[in-house]
Structures are given as structure tokens and as C-alpha cells.
Amino acid sequence: MSEFRVKSIGSLEASFPVPGDKSMSHRAAMIAGLAEGVSTVRNFLPSEDCLNTLRAMRACGVEVEVLEEMPGFGPTSMRIHGRNMQLAAPTAPIDCGNSGTGMRLLAGLFAGQSFECELFGDESLSGRPMGRITGPLGDMGAKIDCLGEKPGCAPLRIHGAKLHPIRYELPVASAQVKSAVLLAGMFCEGITTAVQPAETRDHTERMLESFGVKLTTEVNAISIEGGQVPQARDFQVPGDISSAAFWVVAAAALPGSCLVIRQVGLNPTRTAILDVIERMGAQITRTIHSADDGEPIGDIEIRGAKLTGTELLRSEIPNLIDEIPVIAVAAAMAEGKTVIRNAKELRVKETDRIDTVVKGLRAMGGNIEEFEDGMEITGGSPLHAATIESHGDHRIAMAFAIAGLFASGETVVRNTDCVNTSYPGFARQLAAVLAESRNEADYDLPTVPA
Ligand code: S3P
């Protein structure tokens, strides 16, 4: 089992890209796989989560020609031969690994097929709530059995059916649930509407539109008319802002730092992390270079400062839900209180992230109070090294690697193979950023393929 060993550093100075966006890579594999024609997808994230989704699409007869790879991980550029909405029946159960996005969106795709299939995942995924998608997909006419030991949990046996459209009011602000309903809606006659209680990431809508599918959005109600066929196109996946978030916090909390993260996705439904870190006192410059594929891409420059605490707004929570572990680390470095409430969803992520963050920060000397729906961190006192267990959660492993940069002594993060679910090459990039910041010649920064 691998681990990170991290020591403190005075300041950071480097410029580099991060790997492709996880949410968009899942969607690109699915939508290009459904499309009419051959799409080229570049800067695909070769993480275990996204590779599982790509394998799932291949299992449904989608042909994938690999053009470029990230050595040791998997394809980054590929040609995907779309099936014109006609998926083939997979011959074996489909492994979604650790990925809630993979399982929930694929369930949406499979709900309207004329075959039966099974989706399963690892221990963490087998404990996460699937009723939030089996409910609306069931209302549309699919029959989905939750076969897990825990009620409402995976494995899922999906008996595809001829679906009928619904108007579904989501009880939780979840892009995964919205996307499952909209993808299922593509296989219905008529108009399917997903109404979200708050804005969530809109990559499904943007990507479908860039593949020529028409949707209408009225405030938080998104509608799709079934029967439309996505048209193949070339799609460049931007760098993942959720991966960039670790570097944003690393630089922000170390006065004198200047990091530039290049080619990052700057979709406004994902950039609340930047607003929060700016509010805490760091200086962040965003420069958008393009939005050719419906998704803004640009560089962010972060200059470190002595941070001060802040309160996360209720409306910001869905936008930065994945960044909360590393925001909590920034809060431990910030003078005063940081309040994170209305974030109960953290309890059903890859781990219970309220519990794992609270335990980890306390082990490093952080002053943190736990609530059912969040936490309050009183920062500013020095952190010290500790041995932190990731519990197999990628974002916990990386957040505490960053905490190690701020702590006295050597921080050990245990059980770090899980970072490959979202950030292949993180350990190498960390070593490279530290080497570049210390002006050591011997480093090798990964680059984004052309
Ligand atoms: C995702 C949506 C979010 C996020 C997850 C990826 C997506 O989950 O936490 O990492 O790609 O749609 P919810 O929509 O369930 O909040």
C-alpha cells in the first residue's frame, strides 16, 4: 500500500497544467459513445473512475481507438465510434469501481435500453445511496433492483424498458441525479424535465448542446426532448479545477507563493473554490483563453497571503462540494473562524468526508468542531505532522498531502493508491512542484497532450 511523506515548504513557485476534468471525461465517453459518427476526445482523464466508464461503453459495443496515452495510466486522446443511440447488451456485469458519477450516469443510460445489465462497484460505492436515481428512473418505467447488503445500494440490476418522460423535482442538489434523468430522457418520447433545488455543475447540458442536442433551461428546470441523436465532434477536455484546487490552496496559504495552473476548466458552476479562496485573502487571476467546446478554459494564477476565515454560502456548497476537504485545510491556516454548513452531502461521498476531515485535522492540531451538516474551523495556530489515514478516499489523501506542506515535521498520508481514481500522477506532480519551487533542476513536469 503506498503512502505520501510530506514536509513543510516556505513558498511555492511553478507553472503547470493538471490532468483532464473527471466529470467531463465520464460524460465525453458516454455522449461520444451514443453519438452518430466518430468523435475525437482529447485530454481525457486516464483515472480509474473514467477508465471504468470507458470500459463500460466498450462493453456496449463502442469502439475506441487510442491516439495518445499517459504512460502507466491509460488513454488521453482517442477516437470514439458512436453507436447512433443503439447500445449493445453487455455480456458481463459492469464494474464502476469507486465512481458514483460512473454508476449513476450509466444507470440513466441503461434505463431505456432493451436489455438487462448489472452495475457494481467497490466497497465504498456499494455503501452509497442509489435510491436517488432508482426513484426517478423507476418513475420513468425502468425496473432497477438494488442488490446490495445495504438497502438502496449497489449492485444494481437494471431491466431496461420503454421509458416515459417525467418532470422530476430533485430532493437534493445533485448533478449526478440531474444527469441520470436527462440521459434517460434521451430515450423517451416527449419532454423530460429535471428541476434542481439549487444550481449544480452543468457539464451534461453543455456537452449535449455541443454535440448538437437541444435543451431548454428555465432557472433551475432543465428539459430535454427525447429522440435527438448527438452528432459526433471533437472535444477537448479542460484541466480539472477540482484537481487544481489542491494547488490553489497550497499556494494561497503560503505567503510569497506564485503558482500558475494552465488550461483549467473555468465553468462558473465549478469556480466557487476560487471565490472562497479569494475571499480568504489570496490573490487569484483568471484568464480565459477559449470556450470552443462549450466549456471555458483558462489559466489561474494564485498568489499566497496570510489567510482569514470565511463563511461558505449555502448556494456555494453544490459548486464546491468536492473541494471542501482542501478548503478545510486552508481554513486551518486562516486566522479566525471558517464556517461550512448545509453540506450534509459530504457524508455520502467516497467516505463520510465530515468525519474524515475532522479526524485528520484534529490529528494535526487543528481546532475544529463537527456538525451533522458541516464543520467550523478556528484556524491560525500551527499544524504539526501526523500520520493520516485516507480511508481510500482520493480527495482526503490529497488534501492532507497539502496540509503536510504547512505542518512542522513529516506528515505521512497512508493508503494513497486511491488518488488514481481522480488524479493520476499526483505524487509525481507534487514532487515536481516542490523541486521547481526549491529551484532544483531535476524535475519532470507532466504536460497536457496537444
Ligand atoms: C459529479 C457531481 C457531484 C460531485 C462528483 C461529480 C458529477 O456529485 O461530488 O464528484 O460529475 O456530476 P453530486 O452531483 O452527487 O453532488
Image (cartoon, rainbow, N blue to C red):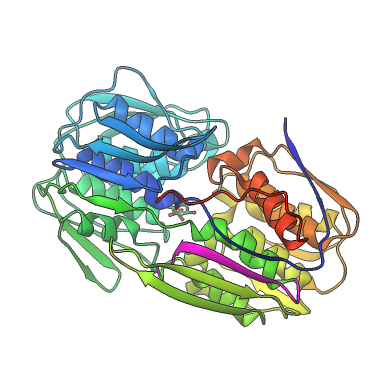
Give whichever of 165, 26 is nearer the camera: 26
For residue 13: magenta? no
Q: Residue at x 47, y 73 (%)?
A: 315
Name the side, left or right, on which 336 lies relative to 385.
left
Q: Is residue 375 visible?
A: no
Residue 404 is drawn in which quadrant? bottom right
Judged from this view, the residue extending furthest toward the front is 441
Residue 195 is drawn in which quadrant? bottom left
Q: How many discs appear?
A: 0
Residue 139 in the image: above or below residue 311: above
Judged from this view, the residue extending furthest toward the top is 91
Q: Residue at x 28, y 60 (%)?
A: 293
Name the side, left or right, on which 435 lies relative to 48.
right
| Residue 206 image offset from top left, x and y in percent | 28, 61
Judged from this view, the residue extending furthest toward the right is 409
Residue 158 is drawn in which quadrant? top left
| Residue 365 image offset from top left, x and y in percent | 87, 61
Give whichever of 63, 438 is nearer the camera: 438
Residue 311 in the image: above or below residue 162: below
Q: Residue at x 59, y 75 (%)?
A: 276
Name the side, left or right, on which 432 lies relative to 348.
right
Q: Residue at x 71, y 49 (%)?
A: 431
Q: Where, quadrant-wise, is the N terminus in this rendering?
A: top right
| Residue 232 image offset from top left, x and y in percent | 18, 46
For residue 265: magenta? yes
Q: Is residue 398 visible?
A: yes
Please report the bounds of the magenta region as a residue range. 254-267
| Residue 344 image offset from top left, x and y in percent | 57, 59
